[in-house]
Image (tube, rainbow, N blue to C red):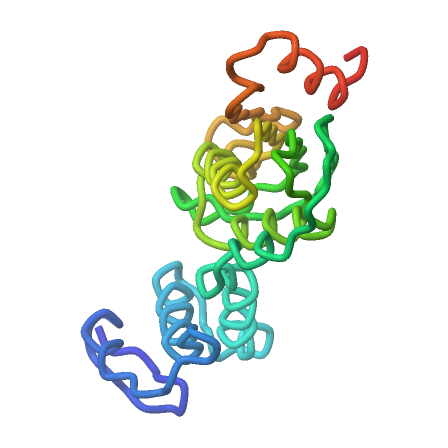
Amino acid sequence: MATSGKDGDRFDGSLLAEVDDVEAPPVGGVDLERIERAVREILFAVGEDPDREGLRETPARVARMYAELFGGLHEDPRVHLRKFFTEKYDEVVLVRDISFNSMCEHHMMPFMGKAHIGYLPGGRVVGLSKLARVVEGVARRPQVQERMTEEIARLLEEELQVKGVAVVIEAVHTCMTVRGVKKPGAICVTSAMKGAFRTRPTTRSEIMTLIYGDR
């Protein structure tokens, strides 16, 4: 079936047959024009007219949104942990309630929530804002919560040479709150425990108490 192109041109068949011809250079690692063409095809596929007034700029908006949401694909979150300070501190360091937004790779729908990160220093401590930047860098890519939790823990374990790491993430997934089973209010909780937090029950209990209190 023939459809209208962005500049009024006509082309036949699926966008998949056309998209590889796009020569526009990627912007920040993201090919905005290619995304725009794909969004136009989706609008056609669901029975909409992407040239009507309300949708005319939608493909460009979606392209810019994806460039923002998936910016973590083009950065290395390790860099935030490579500026550390040598301190003789051997008690828990915890940052709670680090908010994040990510995109579930299964349905390309957002999930959002809070990350709690604690660690037992092994001689190195890092600026607290760096932990939030690690969460942001890992979250801003097609993701699943389980992998995100494990990856954050592994990065801290490797880069800071800690005695233990605890990462707990709580999130609401729109792929189960607004579609499918439609269960608003459901929260997914995942954890990754490394080192002392995994091998010593008392240390694990301490970090969970610090995170949740009496809950």
- Coordinates of residue 6 in the picture (x, y in percent): 40, 85
Q: Residue at x 46, y 80 (%)?
A: 27
Q: Residue at x 59, y 30 (%)?
A: 167
- Coordinates of residue 152 in the picture (x, y in percent): 52, 40
Q: Residue at x 50, y 64 (%)?
A: 66
* As drawn, 152 above or below 119: below
Query: For the C terminus, which image quadrant?
Result: top right
Farthest residue in the right direction? Answer: 214
Instruction: Tell whether 74 sits left or right of 183.
Output: left
- Coordinates of residue 4 in the picture (x, y in percent): 34, 82
Foreground residue among 193 and 177: 193
Instruction: Tell whether 204 sits left or right of 214.
Output: left
- Coordinates of residue 207 in the picture (x, y in percent): 69, 20
Foreground residue among 206 and 102: 206
Q: Residue at x 36, y 69 (%)?
A: 38
Farthest residue in the top direction? Answer: 201
Query: For the N terminus, which image quadrant?
Result: bottom left
Foreground residue among 98 and 57: 98
